[in-house]
Amino acid sequence: MEQQRNLRVNKLKTILLSLTLVLLFNGCTSNNLIDVNMEVPDNSWMYAKSVRATLDIKDSSKGYNVFFKIRNTADYRYANIYVIARLKGNTLSKSTRYQFQLAKADGSWLGKGSGNLYSNTFPLLKDFHFPKAGNYVLEVEQNMRDNPLVGVSDIGLTVDLVNP
């Protein structure tokens, strides 16, 4: 009788451990279809050095979120940044200028800070539906007066599926 009870307890422990592992691994999955990061040489972002990503859209009925990521140093001279985002492919050709706030009016940096670096993620497109399945190219370039734009260490793009 004691042996049967031990078997049941061990079986229950195995089931609970398996269930915990399944939940843990499912919780670690990401909806990121694209996560591209580019280091900016000498922390000086040139007009000609845009960050690019190629998207292979399989289902145009689904919505996609597109984000621009930037890491700047304390050497960045401005409170904001202007960028131009271009999305091309199939019949789509879309170009939009964005302004993003990097610092408050008092000069304190926004975003996550670590030492001399500050990271921000900004939305470019929310719940965007591509007109057709196929390949699209997303490109973001800086659109400030300075060329090069000093104080930018990294730039990137992330594309997520809204409801996987």
Image: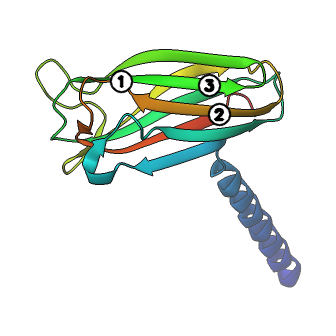
- Left or right: 38 in relation to 29: left
The disc, 1 or 2, on the residue closer to the chain's N-terminal end is 2
Q: Name the residue under label 1.
A: 143
Q: How far apart are marks 3 and 2 (CA)?
A: 6 Å
Determine the secondary structure under disc 2: strand
Expressed as whole percent of the image width and height from the top left, the position of residue 22 reads: 74, 57
Q: Say whether marks 1 and 3 touch (CB < 8 Å).
A: no
Q: Indicate the amino acid at tag 3.
A: Leu
Q: How far apart are marks 1 and 3 (CA)?
A: 16 Å
- For residue 19, above or below residue 103: below
Residue at the spot x=61%, y=17% of the render? 94
What is the quadrant of residue 149 in the picture? top left
Q: Mark 2 points at which residue?
A: 137
Q: Indicate the amino acid at tag 2.
A: Val
- Left or right: 4 in relation to 76: right
Between 115 and 72, which is closer to the camera in this rendering?
72
Q: Indicate the amino acid at tag 1.
A: Asn
- For residue 43, above or below residue 17: above
Q: Mark 3 points at which residue?
A: 87
Between 51 and 66, which is closer to the camera in this rendering?
51
